[in-house]
Image (tube, grey):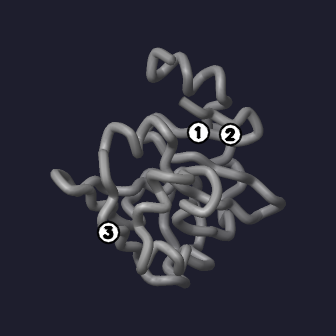
Amino acid sequence: MNFPAELKYTKDHEWVKLEGNVATIGITDFAQRELGDIVYVEINAVGSTVAQHDVFGTIEAVKTVSDLFMPVAGEIAEHNPALDSQPELVNSDPYGQGWIIKATITDPSTVDSLLNVEQYQALIGA
């Protein structure tokens, strides 16, 4: 499994790429493997402000639907339009073309609770 060292992670299996006050968010390689074939991604409205750990959308696989939890407090700035027609990008490229949302961080202190790659690997036993 792939776990880029430059990203931050959550116990709920989201990853976060930080660029200033913008967070690009998706699900980890581990999470997409556990879910199986992704068939649909639904996101709260762009412009919505979401508290850390609150649900910002759902991801649907062939056999299950899972909530997506906001890793940092922020406002949803955009969602990945490619996922509307190609949700399987989450499976094939979870850290690249399969990103889910970009959010403007509204509370920078929430970044402090994110896991580094070693902490996340220990969490999942990788």
Kind of residue indicated by mark 1 = Tyr
Please tell me whether mark 3 or mark 2 is closer to you in this view.
Answer: 3
Badge 3 marks a residue whose secondary structure is strand
Badge 2 marks a residue whose secondary structure is helix
Query: Looking at the image, is 35 positioned above or below residue 125?
Result: below
Q: From the image, tell me which residue sits under label 1.
A: 9
Residue 96 falls left or right of residue 61: right
In which quadrant of the rendered image does the N terminus lie?
top right
Q: From the image, tell me which residue sits under label 2.
A: 112
Labels 2 and 1: the sequence-earlier one: 1
Query: Looking at the image, is 10 positioned above or below residue 27?
Result: above
Where residue 124 sits in the image (x, y, percent)? 45, 22
At x 62%, y 68%, the residue is 103
Q: From the image, tell me which residue sits under label 3.
A: 40
Asked whether the residues under the numbered discs 2 and 1 touch, taking CB atoms below 8 Å apart as contact, a structural biologist would say no
Characterize the local packing of mark 1: few (<14), some (14-19) or many (20 or more) Cα atoms within 10 angstroms.
many
Characterize the local packing of mark 2: few (<14), some (14-19) or many (20 or more) Cα atoms within 10 angstroms.
few
Please tell me which residue lies in front, 124 or 106. 124
Total residue callouts: 3
Alpha-carbon span between mark 2 and mark 1:
11 Å
Where residue 63 sits in the image (x, y, percent)? 16, 52
